[in-house]
Amino acid sequence: MRKKISIELFEEGVKANVYSYRINNGDLEYEKFIDAFIDSDYSKDYDIIDDVVDKILLNGAQERYFRPEGKMLDYLFAIPQRGLGCELRVFCLRINENILILGNGGIKPKGVNKYQDDPTLNQIAEEMQIISHKLLESINNYSTTIYQKEFIQIQKIFI
């Protein structure tokens, strides 16, 4: 079954805007992440991620805030960056320093070295890589246009 992806503004910041996406008119993927972890046993880890998102809104989506997760030529990253001792990961597409698309995420237990080793994280990351590929294609052919920190026009994405 094909999935319709809608990219929507989640929060406007000083230097960057944060977007998220919904699948087939469901909840925003980042809202699903928030609902799952804000009041959970991982609330301290969630707070770390929330603080990083606040810094991105204020300072821009600088590379130092992320851990690279994807392949060459896709925009896939994860928050938080390495070294914070956080077991939660939220996947995102860093389009540039002004636009970030937050997706869903989950728990990456200490014994798991790569997101590919966890079925839930792997599914989210692979889905976001497909979205990244389709979005890059539409930016390159001008079906999707960006001005500063905003999507002016977004081509419909189906995966």
Image (cartoon, rainbow, N blue to C red):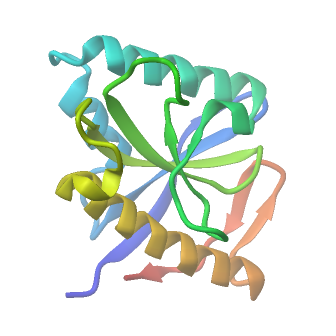
Which residue is at a point 15% across and 15% down the rendered structure image? Answer: 41
- Quarter of the rendering occupied by the C terminus: bottom left
Question: Relative to 134, does residue 103 appear above or below in the rendering?
Answer: above
Q: With 4 as the anchor, is 156 left or right in this view?
A: right
Q: Position of residue 104 (x, y in %)?
A: 34, 47
Question: Relative to 3, does residue 98 appear above or below in the rendering?
Answer: above
Which residue is at a point 49% across and 43% down the rendered structure image? Answer: 78
**Which quadrant of the figure has residue 158?**
bottom left
- Quarter of the rendering occupied by the N terminus: bottom left
Which residue is at a point 76% across and 25% down the rendered structure image? Answer: 59
Q: Position of residue 74 (x, y in %)?
A: 61, 67
Q: Position of residue 44 (x, y in %)?
A: 32, 11
Instruction: Give 28 or 72, whichever is nearer the viewer.
Output: 72
Q: With 78 as the anchor, is 137 left or right in this view?
A: right
Question: Relative to 70, does residue 42 appear above or below in the rendering?
Answer: above
Question: Relative to 149, does residue 56 appear above or below in the rendering?
Answer: above
Q: Position of residue 46 (x, y in %)?
A: 34, 21
